[in-house]
Amino acid sequence: MSISVSRAAALALACSPSLAHAQAAPDDGTGVTIGEVVVTAGSMTRSTSEVLTSVDVLGGDVAQRQNVDNAWELFARLPGVVLTDFGQGTTSGRFSIRGFNGEGEINAVKLLIDGIPSNDNAGRMDFIDLVSPLAIGSVELVRGTSDARWGLHAIAGSANIVTRTGGTYLDTRAAVAAFGTVEAQLAAGAETGRLSQNLAIGYRRSDGYRDHAGFDRLTLSGKWRLDLGAAQVGLIARHGRAEADEPGYLTDADAYTDRRRSYPVSATDGGTRVLDQYAVTLDAAPSAHVALSLAGYANRIDDDRYVRFSATVAQQRRLTVEQQYGVVGALHWHVAPWLMAEAGGDVQWQHNLSQRWTTERRRLLAATRDQDVDLTVGGGYVQAVLTPTLWLRVTPAWRLDRVGGDYVNRLNGRAYPVNAYGTISQPKLSVAVEPLAGVTAYGNYGRTFQIGAGSGAFIVPPRVRDVAASINEGYEAGVRLARGRWLTARLAVWQQTATGELRRRLNDPAGEFDNLGATRRRGLDLEASVQPGDGWSAWASWSHQRAVIRVPDPATPSQAGNAIDHVPRHVYTAGIEWAPRGGRWRGSLWGNGQSSYELTPANTQGRYGGYVQLTAEAGYRLTRAVELSVQLRNLANDRYEYVWFDGTERLHAPADPRTLAAAVRARF
């Protein structure tokens, strides 16, 4: 397992809250690590260590041993992350940060897998299903607006899932859990001469806690890397297929009396999702002071879903086929001991079909959408890292993005032009000072952007003029304290404002949007970890955030000052772990949770969704290679849920109750 940006990982290792065998690292970064990250040589380009903002890294040792139905659930271990658990088949849920919600109306996190862009057209994270936990080397979560490396979808930050790279190993894990859940995973690596190979297979099926909630998922991946001396050439291939039923949502009357129930109207709901991702990479270092990275990739998603949200609406068939092609590159230059410069960019071409029909028990009745969208988004950035003294680092940067494309409504044969967004300018600036050894104070400023999704990026009647990109402007100030390996703490305050924020109408056949208005998100993040020795470690985090509508759309003046829906004000996580070096036993107890949230921007439907979930885990090493473990999730059996309002009634999706899983892992 590795992080391709080796310096970022090394900086973060110094502040690990649960690291038993960390490597020594300098204490001059702003990152925090949970778990163990094995550091290997990587490209200097696009390094997270040059992003002076709140960065958290989840180690592969933590990710690999988790019992989760979906990879997005792993983000529960990271501070300040809100999880949205739909519990609806292949549309299971997602995570969000910095006062944005996970509803799908505004998707604000750039998802990357090994540095390859992995969002769909609307910014959703369906491609995260390509990764099984055992294949993960680390997860990097970058918050804020000051990162110049990414443009499209990076409204509030980015998340990079780095899979295991290099090494010779064989790692297998088999698990059984409640509700007929079985899982088998395999990860293998082989290095022979100049060639390294990393393969992974993951399979998981379950009947689900609720009725009509079964799923079956298979993932396959391979990474090949050829060392040519001054350059390394790589190939990545991933494939995933999932089939799942959907239990639907419960009304107020039934949500707290029969949580496992699925209504007859949902009996034929469900779908199939097929994902593919391919990439060719090049990392070169023509000299000791210059590094170049290039990657070309192709993504494809075929998503076929039947869904009926309540008895008052018809069933729909939603068919989405997206083909994405892109190039990512950067050139890094150590100009002088006190100056590093980097220039990079990316371009993504998309050809997307989005079709919908009203149906009756999967029988087609009438077409309601047939959209053919071609979209091109390209951007470039320049940044410098200046270190005029040992205690000061300044990183100015500038990013520019352009948008083009065509849209044809195949129901009426009409074509529409893309909004003339022009050149979207995003200046950035970050500063970090180290007044004392182990104390780093940092601040940053930056802009990010949001454009319409699907047909929302085009001038479609009744719109007759261009809709400008929504500009997010963010600030952050923080301080990080590190005292060797035994204590790490970080405090950050932040604010992010937006102009003309666009909110997708999720159930609109035309795929249109609403103008949420000018918004403001602000918050405070506090996290700390201690490692007193003897294998003990403990950590805790608390995030207070508030997202409000400052200036609403003229059509909804009463929403001024209202809270944005599905954004909890408090998000927290804490835990304790015991893992003595060389011992046979290990154990941990940790939890995460959030406060309740509003269901609509009108703030008239009450507050729901608060929870505290505790997880206990114990492992026993039978031999040097084989470990048995048990994990009990939702230890306190908290009856929590996801709730939304469809315009007529509140709809509930109960989460899993207390769940026991047992696993055996063998590593060679």
Image (cartoon, helix red, strand yellow):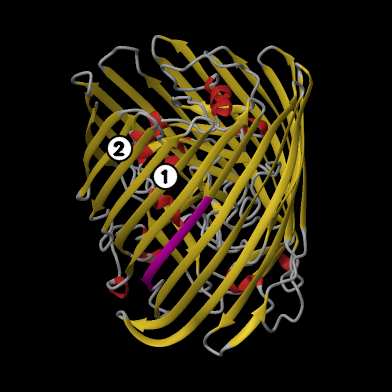
Residue 615 appearing in the image = yes
The residue that mark 2 highlights is: 187
The residue that mark 1 highlights is: 73
The image quadrant of residue 605 is bottom right
Residue 138 in magenta? no
Q: Residue at x 54, y 43 (%)?
A: 159
Residue 254 locus on image (x, y percent): 35, 64
Residue 250 locus on image (x, y percent): 37, 65
- Within 10 angstroms of label 1, few (less than 14), some, or many (20 or more) residues? some
The image quadrant of residue 378 is bottom right
- Amino acid marked by disc 2: Ala
Q: Looking at this view, is 266 or 273 the one in front?
A: 273
Does dot 2 land on a helix, a strand or a loop? strand
Q: Residue at x 44, y 65 (%)?
A: 651
The magenta stretch spans which residues? 296-307
Q: CB under 8 Å between callouts 2 and 1?
A: no
Magenta span: helix, strand or loop, mainly?
Answer: strand
Does dot 1 land on a helix, a strand or a loop? helix
Labels in figure, total:
2
